[in-house]
Image (tube, rainbow, N blue to C red):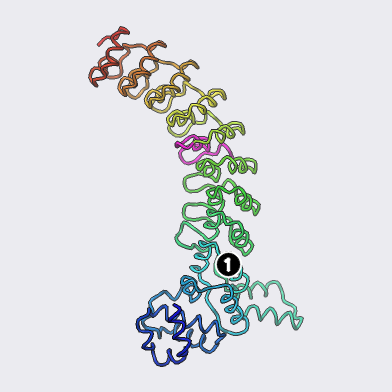
Amino acid sequence: MEKIYGIIKKEGIHHIITNGKHYLLTEYDENDVLICMYVIAIDNNDLKSIVELNENFSNNKFKSVFFEKEKGIMYHIYVRNLLTLSRLKKIISITEETKVEFKVSIELLSILLQKNEIKLLKILINHLLFSNSFVLSLLYYYKYKKSLANLKLKNMISKEKEKVDLNQLYNSDYYTLLDYACEKGYETIIKYLVKQGADINKENILGETPLFFACRSQNVNVVKGILENGTNINKENILGETPLFIACEIKSEGIAEYLIDYGAEINKEDNDGETPLFVACEYGNLNESLVKMLVEHGADVNKENEYGRIPLFSAIEYGHENIVQCFIENGADIEKEDEDGYTPLYIACENGKDAIVKQLVEQGASINKANNKNHQTPLIISCIKGYENIVKYLIDHGADVNKENGKKESPLFLSHQLKRESITKLLIEKGAKM
């Protein structure tokens, strides 16, 4: 760009526009040449050239220039790393003193936001989002002490305010500018966008407001800032989840506790009948203190989802021994059956969770209870899965080695059929019959 800049500066913008691209510029991209002409005109405060460039640009006289006009010249200057603070101030000076205007596009604001260009954003929002005519009209009324009725002022603002819609979606229907700033944790930009009228209750197509994205930032201060501006803390997305679900999903105890203290419904159900406590128990990266905090704040440990399961089932599936103990100590029903008749002990056996099997049996879980789907007992599923240690433990604690499933298949028959030799031998030793 440096060489292009030098050639244009020497030959003159008007000369190049009038006579076509200079022979020294033929090897360069047409878009870069156009942007360089704008930059030189801005640097030299060359209003005549800027007007000439604008006229030619808007009238499509630059036939070989292919970038999108709707993004505005300032956007294309920025993406070429040419929109410095001093250059932006010159643009502002030009727009304030003349009728020349530079478009502030949603694409420009979006990329500045993504790049965390706080200084450039502030200048743009402060100086370039109102038309000159609107500002001059207000100055006129002020200068001549003319009274301005509220209704007239509102009408003027409605007609003359050329503000880029800060609530407009910036890349797709999933994000607004404020959503993006919240998710990235850009506190300064968030304050600025809200101050300039960004809607903190604006929903995307998933039904999520900026508070959902603030929770995903894992920054409590961002969440506080959005809440203090009056957003709905129990707003649901299309899945029936509230921001508290998001905090539990990302395992953020700090954000979850802040939301609860601020009024979030701790036992709110999503579309599957699950509460934030279910979500906190899922996945491998469990935050034990988060789960315990939820329980301490009144989360219902026996709340059923639409499949008849309680949070204890999730804790067992993912092997969270300490959470299983926490639930048991807080009254979780260890004999709870889901819609298929599976009990917590059956789930522990099916998933090979030795330690949890012991926890449940020690608390009095029924060892011989069969499910109502295929009438298998915890011992049968343990034999099928090949978990010898669990099989031995169950037998030692009273499991019926001859209890059959719905197909009249015994534990010994199944272990023999599946070639579980050591388990077959163990069952025979304990008196099992084929």
Determine whether the residue tagged by mark 1 lies in a helix, strand or loop. Answer: helix
- Quarter of the image for residue 34 reads bottom left
Q: State the image coordinates of residue 420 (x, y, percent, origin top left).
A: 26, 19
Q: Is residue 147 above or below residue 22?
A: above
User: Is residue 230 toward the left or the right of residue 382 in the image?
Assistant: right
Does any portion of residue 394 appear in the rendered image? yes
Q: State the image coordinates of residue 139 (x, y, percent, origin top left).
A: 70, 80
Q: State the image coordinates of residue 276 (x, y, percent, origin top left).
A: 53, 38
Q: Amino acid at mark 1?
A: Leu
Kindly identify the residue that appears in the image at 58 percent across and 49 percent down: 219
Q: Residues within 10 Å of mark 1 (few under 14, many from 20)?
A: some
164 inside magenta stretch:
no
Magenta span? 265-285
269 inside magenta stretch:
yes
Does any portion of residue 375 appear in the rendered image? no
Kindly identify the residue that appears in the image at 34 percent across and 25 percent down: 373
Q: Is residue 40 above or below residue 162?
A: below
For mark 1, what is the residue? Answer: 121
User: Is residue 180 toward the left or the right of residue 191 in the image?
Assistant: left
The residue nearer to you, when weighing 266 against 411, is: 411
The C terminus sits in image quarter:
top left
